[in-house]
Image (tube, rainbow, N blue to C red):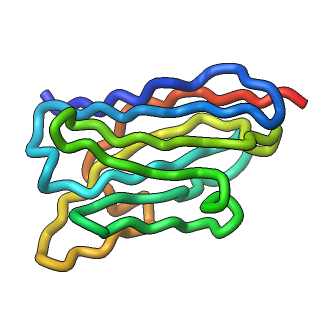
Amino acid sequence: DVQLQASGGGLVQFGGSLRLSCTASGFSFDDYAIGWFRQAPGKEREAIACTGNGDGTAYYNKALKDRFTISRDNTKNTVYLQMNNLKPEDTADYYCAADLMRSLGFVCRRDHRLYDYWGRGTQVTVSS
């Protein structure tokens, strides 16, 4: 069975850090770009970052790029999202998703509707 498991969320104080993990199984991990998204209550799902092959990494929010870093370990079928200097507005459910890299030179995609597999989210709450 295809599984994407996001973990590492929790309650953290303003200015704190968390590292989220997304561990995959049931599909050929190396063939997929992995994206991180988040959704706050009452808001639309927002793309944060994506990592594909090699240097294929994209960040979709300039403000978050200064504080969030995506990385990938294919040996562990895991993608990480390091989040530093967290703010109350970062409070949301965080999700990872897999997007099949259908061609050489595949570029990470921002549109969450294009992703093939989704995991359950992990909740992040930042207190002020």
The quarter of the picture where the C terminus appears is top right
Residue found at x 36% / y 35%? 22
Work out whether residue 97 can be spotted: yes
Q: Is 109 on the left or on the right of 49, as rendered? A: left
Residue 5 at x, y = what percent?
Answer: 34, 28
Query: Can residue 41 be seen at all in this image of the molecule?
Result: no
Q: Residue at x 70, y 50 (%)?
A: 43
Q: Position of residue 91 (x, y in %)?
A: 72, 36
Q: What residue is shown at x 21% (from left), y 37% (from top)?
A: 77
Q: In the rendering, at what x and y percent does residue 17 appear?
A: 66, 33
> Count of labels shown?
0
Residue under the point 64% across and 54% down: 44
Which residue is most to the right? 128
- Residue 100: image quadrant is bottom left
Q: Position of residue 7 (x, y in %)?
A: 45, 25
For the residue pair 60 and 115, the one nearer the viewer reads as 60
Taking depth in this image into account, of 64 and 122 the one nearest to the observer is 64
* Along the line of sight, the residue nearer the viewer: 86 or 4: 86
Q: Is residue 29 above or below residue 102?
A: above
- Give the left or right position of residue 92, taking residue 59 as reference: right
Q: Quadrant of the N terminus?
A: top left
Determine which quarter of the picture holds residue 84. Answer: top right
Decide if residue 93 is on the left or right side of residue 8. right
Looking at the image, the residue that sits furthest to the top is 11
